[in-house]
Amino acid sequence: MAGIFYFALFSCLFGICDAVTGSRVYPANEGPPSAPLNLISNVNETSVNLEWSSPQNTGGRQDISYNVVCKKCGAGDPSKCRPCGSGVHYTPQQNGLKTTKVSITDLLAHTNYTFEIWAVNGVSKYNPNPDQSVSVTVTTNQAAPSSIALVQAKEVTRYSVALAWLEPDRPNGVILE
């Protein structure tokens, strides 16, 4: 396996040299991989299973692995996407995956998420390329709402009781009744 080389162009004047330009150079037959293929998702209320195929172009290397990026998004507006955070869990792991599938759990119900799968190899860090990833946007399913709180009897008569309560903290969808 060939190594990575560096080249720099220097400008010298009176014995003082400054680098004018420079870049990393790796052998012509090696480069970052292309994006994974055929990303499919299976969604329920609080988890997503993702599966994909290996990239068509491995960059001439055998050290392919995959990284998963999770973003929680506002309804219909990709500019409102934010990282999912540490409450979300990945099985077997989020980064350095050697398999082409991952389960993502502890998501919020009835929420939009975008998942990116990045194919990487040993030279990807020297040449990050947006073409190394594929993404899918999903909405988790509705779930039963969380419990209601502070139930109070407002009007009590001989034949009826009027009750009042606070809305659930997590509606997990649209509450119809």
Image (cartoon, rainbow, N blue to C red):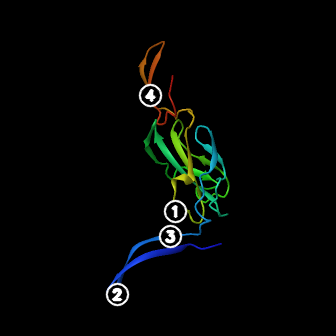
* Residue depicted at x 57% and y 65%: 123
Q: First in sequence: mark 4 or mark 3? A: 3
Q: Secondary structure at mark 2?
A: loop
Question: Furthest-top residue in view?
Answer: 159
* Residue depicted at x 44% and y 28%: 165
Q: Are marks 1 and 3 in contact (CB under 8 Å)?
A: yes
Disc 3 residue type (three-letter): Arg
Q: Secondary structure at mark 3?
A: strand
Q: What's the CA distance linking mark 4 and mark 1?
A: 57 Å
Q: First in sequence: mark 4 or mark 2? A: 2
Q: Circle 2 is placed at which residue position?
A: 15
Q: Circle 1 is placed at which residue position?
A: 127
Q: Is residue 69 left or right of residue 155?
A: right
Question: Of tags 4 and 1, which is closer to the observer?
Answer: 1
Q: First in sequence: mark 1 or mark 3? A: 3
Q: Position of residue 9 (x, y in %)?
A: 42, 75
Question: Furthest-bottom residue in view?
Answer: 15
Q: Circle 3 is placed at which residue position?
A: 24
Q: Is residue 79 above or below residue 151?
A: below
Q: First in sequence: mark 3 or mark 2? A: 2
Q: Secondary structure at mark 4?
A: strand
Q: Is residue 9 left or right of residue 103?
A: left
Q: Which mark is residue 165?
A: 4
